[in-house]
Image (cartoon, grey):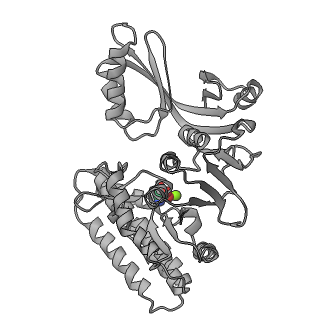
Amino acid sequence: MKVFKFGGASVNSSSAVKNVADILIQYKDDNILTVISAMGKTTNALENLALEYFKKTDKKEGIYDDVKEYHLTIINELFTDKTHQIYTNISDIFNTLYKKIITSPTDNFDFEYDQIVSFGEIISTKIVSNYLSYKNIKNKWIDAREIIRTDLTYREGKVDWSFTESCIQQNILPLFSKNKENLIISQGFIGGGRGNHTVTLGREGSDYSAAIFAFGLNANEMTIWKDVPGLLNADPKFFKDTHKLDTISYREAIELAYYGATIIHPKTIKPLQNKNIPLFVKSFMNPENAGTIISNIENSDDIIPSFIFKQKQALVSISPKDFSFIAEDNLSEIFNIIAENQIKINLMQNSAISFSICMDADNRHFDKLIIDLQQKFKVKYNNNLDLITIRHYNQSIIDKIVSNRKILLEQKSRVTAQIIVEN
Ligand code: ASP
Ligand code: MG
């Protein structure tokens, strides 16, 4: 059994959807569950729609129309039979979305966000599933919200693992084992909380969804189909000379994702590692190429240095107002405030009387964090910074990367160097 994940770029046009169908045909003898993201940049558009809806502006109709138009164009190009059920199917879904955006929002933005943004995945999977059937590729569409159970942390749902695992084993596994189905199509990014509310798993969360399914199914392998040949040692947006990593360990992959390599969602590796399920990262343009294999094999990870650039970083320095030391009591208070504001720390460091954290400057809880910290501490921050992480570094690489930019903070472990520089 295999689990596949196709991201937004792999289904961003009618020809892209056809390409996905071509790949799935190659695997027609396998049992496959495939998770699919929203098409192209739909999630960004729906994010704006949620925002305008919440702010009650008149921009929402225009955004809604654009999203609808985009999908209708793709459908028109895929289905020459204009009486096909997909036309009413999709128009029903858009009507539901429209009804939603003309009702008054609650005062919980994160809740409203999830109810709206999740439409992207529902629409894309309906289109792909119908298209596959249209091309005689038998498949079954499954609503991930009925399978992946989360708590009610909207926009960052925490998975209820035992419920989800037994749900997968009771509802999905039998479909495969009784040979009733061998291709299941479901959504990435979305789950369901108690009371049938849609909860999303965090941006770019479809990789994580695929790993959750792989875990529950005890899959033999999982593949993320990307628009790059595999996992690269640097983001081609910033470096012209990149190398593909052929095989890396779970440990290395989780470190790279943690430091911000955007190719895999950071939560993806743990469920796979826990069940020893290898992860392939392959190109949907060249599906026959090997790509990258991530597995438990500890190999010579240290040969190629990897670079991770995180832009728009803020360095926040926190010090007690009374010149006392940064000690356990202060630290626990600081960490409480950080946790309450759901802040992810990208790097931290302390001195006698100050504690510094590096975080994403565009984090939506940033202002609230600063206000909360200021109740008790003196707070200074700087927010137009880059955080550069180099795995398997050496000094000449650091010098080359930093060149003549001003360094604000530098931290090194045996394998990882992290440097905060002015933009
Ligand atoms: N569609 C969602 C997003 O763009 C989830 C994903 O693509 O992984 O964030
Ligand atoms: Mg995506």
Residue 213 in view in this figure: yes
The image position of residue 4, as x and y in percent, is 55, 64
Q: Is residue 80 left or right of residue 405?
A: left
Residue closest to the far front: 178
Is 394 situated above or below 201?
above
Q: Residue at x 75, y 37 (%)?
A: 303
Which picture quadrant has residue 192? bottom left
Q: Residue at x 37, y 48 (%)?
A: 156
Front one among 311 and 128: 128
The image position of residue 88, as x and y in percent, is 38, 85
The image position of residue 110, as x and y in percent, is 31, 51
Residue 59 in view in this figure: no
Which picture quadrant has residue 279? bottom right
Which picture quadrant has residue 330? top left
Is 185 situated above or below 78?
above
**Which quadrant: the C terminus?**
top right
Q: Is residue 357 left or right of residue 282?
A: left
Front one among 236 and 51: 236
Q: Is residue 395 left or right of residue 64?
A: right
| Tally of marks | 0
Is 72 situated above or below 58?
below
Q: Residue at x 40, y 12 (%)?
A: 326
Front one among 298 and 291: 298
The image position of residue 368, as x and y in percent, is 33, 33
